[in-house]
Image (cartoon, rainbow, N blue to C red):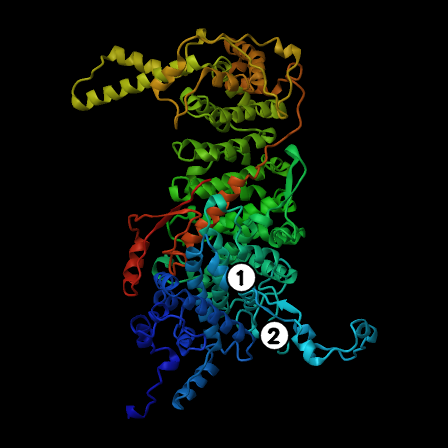
């Protein structure tokens, strides 16, 4: 009975074929022939197996390894060149073939056709499968070519970028117009009619055909908009299957064809190859990144047709912004909402992968500024600004030109949806119940580019009521990842985004509004959005033990930019500002690095701006300044000798405490100190500034000269009369003492001249004037027995005080904006590509086992979590392993 069934029934359904795949690795006519046999002809049947053998991306990546390609490049480079030419030629031919795209294998028509042909022993050709295999093979081959050819570029120039010259087809008979008028005068000038034989020997005009790489980019753009492959067949017009229609509704489109997993999978394959082509720059050292631009990215951002640029840009943008909402209407999206479902159901989420790739391509092209793609500079001095153009980078140019309110709102809502989903996972009562969003880093990079390039977007964000929600989500994400070393690059990027946002005038107007975001209990704070900004920055700085010191300048500058708009700051926020100032004014911190005093300068500016712009609106800040007046007064007389003395005293106290702990541990029954001595030490340690400051009688109130900056106002003669002369520095060998104490980092040794240079420039004048005016009055109130001497009464008194008669005129608000430099551009490019690299380490490992030169890759094995244990168990049957990777980027 069973003998009557067709023997080849399983083949069309993909049940067989494993023997052929195994033979491809082991047989001489398989992948081994690519390196063992020289000069394989393009017409050889050997190449046919590359188009029909593979059924999935994992087949290509497992059966063709980087070592196979690398070995062939060294032993038979002509075969690799032939493989590239054969694959691309087949791809170009198939795109124009009328049988492409073939019917989906999941359709009933296709399955019935396969069954019939299997009964007739006929093989069925799938042009869609062949196109996908061409795309997958190029994904696998090109990274190895980029690695081997990273410096010489000989192979790429000969195979991918060489243009072929052919006779000009515009002069052939096929292109002769209907009506031709021969000009006899021209013939007479040339000496009459020429002999046909002699004319044929003359050199004919020639034209250059596009290079293989240029044709490949055009083919990929066509595949992204191919009906039946990446777009629904219902939008096909006549027999034209290439239709440049925006994928989803959003910017530039109001129609939505709806989700389709098969089309999304094909989009993923094409976008992955596009990303591989753009990844040429990761094989260039960071020092040569700006001077040695990638030809592939240059061509894509400068030579792509305007219509194609707009369609690709809007398609990627809309898909990315719809990414977190489109899955709500699919079965996969609804199942993903179940708690802990992501730990049970494994596998690639097609929609999530597509959104990630769209964001990655957007980030790469919007970030690219190498060589001729650098933005045009306008202005001079401090007013220098840059703006992209169509000739430098068309994608940056058009993203900067977005201006419609509905488009900007659509983008903002898309970013907020992603950030809100992440925050919801933090506040969930079931920890780890929801799957983390894998593309949140890419979303942050895109937000940075929108804030950088589109001025109207920056303005519209805070003209809406969602601006502070965005800031709160960004700060919340920083608080979440601040203790993860592998995420510190993202933290730094977020600090720069915050500095950019804080420099907008519309940002300050929203700081007094209440915070609407639902925060985790440990990060909740009373007050307004401005209070949360201060508390969040305080937590980021004080709870990371200096591991995020590169973030400090941007975070403190953000506070200074926001300071003129602070209103009604709470007691907690005021105390946080004073604590930050105390940390940055610590002598050990000030003297340990040459750049540390600038943080103190920025922090003093925060208080200056509050005093000049919002004194009566912030009595809690005024009260905190008066309570900590000695900290400000000590800064006015700070010098190297006293700083070293305080550092030495602090080190001695720390050493004494260590000895006591060791003695207590060695003899726990006895106490090395009697109760009276211990009480004295405890009382001294609790006194304000004991470990760092001298006594109050040793300090003389002094007001140094204000720095000459555009942000600080000049002091009136009346105000200058309140200042006292600075005490002369002591003449001792301070340098030797600083070396002995081991204060400086990386060989830096503080000197008296260096301390004097920045100490005299500290903007202390305004603060010391406020202290000199209000401190005696507050002390007088405190000495009285009236009800006004309570803290609330004193704050009411401070809120009613006016110091216009002693303070300088209020200066205009002049925020410090983020300024791009060559090193910052290289750093961000390295960070973006580093994140892209890590995202693709599994499951395929596109760039694995290749020598990346833009950044350094470090693999680490961490302790397994429950989700990783489940993955290991399930992956063991498939020959997969799951490990955590981290990446460290080289900083220029």
Q: CA distance from mark 2 to mark 1?
A: 33 Å
User: Residue 683's quadrant in the figure?
Assistant: top left
Q: Secondary structure at mark 1?
A: loop
The answer to whether the residues at label 2 and label 1 have Cβ atoms under 8 Å apart is: no
Look at the image and tell me whether residue 753 can be seen: yes
Looking at the image, which residue sits at the far right?
Answer: 185
Q: Secondary structure at mark 2?
A: loop
Q: Position of residue 891 (x, y in %)?
A: 45, 40
> Toward the viewer: 378 or 357?
378
Q: Which mark is residue 161?
A: 1
> Toward the viewer: 827 or 886?
827
What residue is rendered at 54% in x and 12% in y? 775
> Toward the viewer: 842 or 748?
748
Look at the image and tell me whether residue 520 can be seen: no
Q: For label 2, count other residues whose C-alpha is less than 10 Å away and answer few (under 14), some (14-19) or many (20+).
A: some
Q: Position of residue 840 (x, y in %)?
A: 41, 56
Left of 92 or right of it: where is 670? left
Q: Which residue is mark 2?
A: 236
- In the image, residue 849 sits, relative to residue 109, either above or below, namely above
User: Residue 653's quadrant in the figure?
Assistant: top left
Q: Which mark is residue 804?
A: none
Q: Position of residue 738 (x, y in %)?
A: 38, 18
Who comes first in sequence, dot 2 or dot 1?
A: 1
Mark whose residue sits in front, 2 or 1: 1
């Amino acid at each position: 009975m069973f003998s009557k069934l067709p023997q080849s029934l399983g083949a069309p359904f993909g049940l067989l074929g494993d023997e052929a795949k195994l033979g491809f690795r082991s047989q001489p006519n398989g992948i081994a022939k690519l390196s063992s046999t020289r000069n394989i002809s393009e017409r050889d049947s050997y190449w046919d197996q590359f188009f029909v053998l593979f059924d999935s991306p994992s087949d290509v990546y497992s059966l063709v390894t980087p070592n196979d390609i690398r070995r062939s490049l060294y032993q038979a480079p002509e075969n690799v060149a032939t493989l590239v030419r054969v694959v691309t030629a087949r791809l170009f031919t198939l795109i124009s073939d009328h049988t492409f795209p073939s019917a989906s294998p999941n359709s009933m028509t296709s399955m019935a056709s396969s069954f019939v042909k299997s009964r007739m022993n006929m093989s069925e050709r799938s042009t869609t499968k062949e196109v996908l295999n061409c795309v997958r093979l190029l994904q696998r081959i090109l990274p190895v070519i980029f690695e081997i050819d990273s410096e010489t570029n000989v192979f790429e120039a000969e195979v991918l970028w060489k243009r072929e010259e052919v006779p000009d087809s515009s002069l052939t008979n096929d292109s002769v117009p209907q009506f031709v008028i021969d000009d006899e005068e021209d013939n007479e000038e040339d000496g009459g009619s020429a002999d046909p034989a002699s004319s044929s020997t003359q050199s004919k005009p020639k034209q250059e055909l596009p290079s293989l790489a240029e044709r490949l980019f055009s083919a990929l753009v066509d595949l992204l908009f191919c009906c039946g492959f990446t777009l629904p067949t219902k939008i096909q017009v006549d027999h034209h299957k290439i239709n440049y229609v925006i994928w989803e509704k959003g910017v530039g489109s109001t129609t939505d064809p709806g989700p389709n997993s098969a089309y999304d999978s094909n989009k993923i394959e094409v976008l992955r190859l596009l990303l591989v082509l753009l990844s040429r720059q990761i094989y260039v050292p960071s020092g040569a990144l700006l001077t040695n631009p990638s030809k592939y990215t240059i061509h894509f951002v400068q030579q792509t047709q305007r219509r194609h640029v707009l369609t690709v840009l809007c398609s990627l943008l809309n898909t990315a912004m719809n990414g977190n909402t489109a899955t709500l209407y699919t079965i996969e999206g609804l199942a993903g909402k179940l708690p802990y479902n992501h730990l049970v159901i494994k596998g690639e989420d097609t929609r999530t992968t597509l959104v990630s790739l769209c964001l990655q391509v957007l980030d790469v092209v919007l970030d690219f500024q190498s060589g001729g793609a650098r933005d045009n500079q306008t202005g001079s001095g401090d007013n220098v600004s840059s703006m992209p153009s169509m000739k430098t980078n068309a994608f940056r140019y058009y993203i900067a030109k977005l201006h419609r309110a509905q488009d900007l709102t659509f983008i903002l809502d898309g970013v907020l949806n992603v950030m809100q989903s992440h925050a919801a996972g933090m506040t969930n009562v079931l920890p780890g119940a929801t799957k983390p969003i894998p593309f949140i880093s890419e979303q942050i990079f895109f937000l940075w580019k929108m804030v950088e390039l589109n001025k109207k977007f920056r303005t519209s964000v805070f003209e809406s009521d969602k601006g502070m929600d965005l800031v709160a989500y960004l700060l919340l994400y920083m608080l979440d990842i601040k203790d993860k070393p592998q995420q510190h690059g993202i933290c730094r990027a977020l600090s720069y985004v915050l500095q950019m946002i804080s420099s907008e005038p519309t940002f300050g107007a929203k700081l007094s509004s209440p915070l609407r975001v639902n925060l985790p209990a440990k990060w909740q704070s009373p007050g307004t959005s401005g209070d949360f900004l201060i508390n969040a920055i305080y937590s980021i700085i004080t709870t990371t033990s200096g591991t995020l010191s590169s973030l400090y300048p941007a975070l403190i500058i953000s506070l200074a930019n926001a300071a003129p708009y602070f209103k009604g700051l709470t007691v907690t926020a005021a105390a946080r500002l004073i604590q930050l100032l105390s940390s940055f004014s610590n002598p050990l911190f000030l003297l340990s690095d040459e750049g540390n005093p600038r943080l103190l300068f920025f922090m003093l500016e925060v208080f200056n701006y509050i005093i000049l712009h919002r004194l009566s609106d912030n009595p809690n800040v005024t009260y905190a300044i008066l309570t900590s007046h000695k900290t400000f007064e000590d800064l006015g007389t700070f010098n190297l000798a006293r700083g070293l003395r305080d550092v030495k005293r602090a080190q001695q106290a720390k050493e004494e405490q260590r000895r006591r702990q060791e003695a207590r541990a060695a003899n726990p029954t006895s106490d090395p100190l009697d109760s009276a001595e211990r009480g004295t030490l405890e009382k001294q340690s609790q006194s304000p500034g004991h470990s760092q400051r001298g006594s109050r009688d040793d300090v003389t109130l002094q007001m140094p000269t204000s720095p000459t900056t555009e942000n600080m106002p000049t002091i009136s003669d009346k105000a200058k009369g309140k200042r006292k002369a600075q005490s002369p520095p002591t003449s001792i060998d301070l340098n030797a003492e600083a070396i002995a104490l081991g204060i400086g980092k990386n060989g830096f040794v503080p000197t008296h001249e260096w301390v004097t240079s920045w100490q005299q420039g500290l903007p202390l004048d305004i603060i010391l004037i406020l202290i000199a005016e209000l401190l005696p009055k507050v002390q007088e109130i405190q000495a009285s027995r009236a009800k006004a001497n309570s803290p609330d009464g004193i704050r009411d008194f401070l809120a009613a005080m006016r110091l216009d008669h002693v303070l300088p005129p209020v200066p205009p608000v002049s925020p410090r904006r983020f300024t791009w430099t060559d090193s910052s551009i290289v750093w961000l490019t390295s960070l973006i590509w580093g994140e892209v690299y890590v995202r693709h380490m599994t499951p395929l490992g596109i760039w694995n086992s290749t020598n990346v030169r833009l950044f350094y890759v470090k693999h680490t094995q961490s302790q397994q979590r429950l989700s990783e244990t489940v993955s290991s168990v399930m992956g063991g049957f498939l020959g997969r392993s799951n490990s955590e990777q981290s990446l460290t980027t080289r900083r220029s």
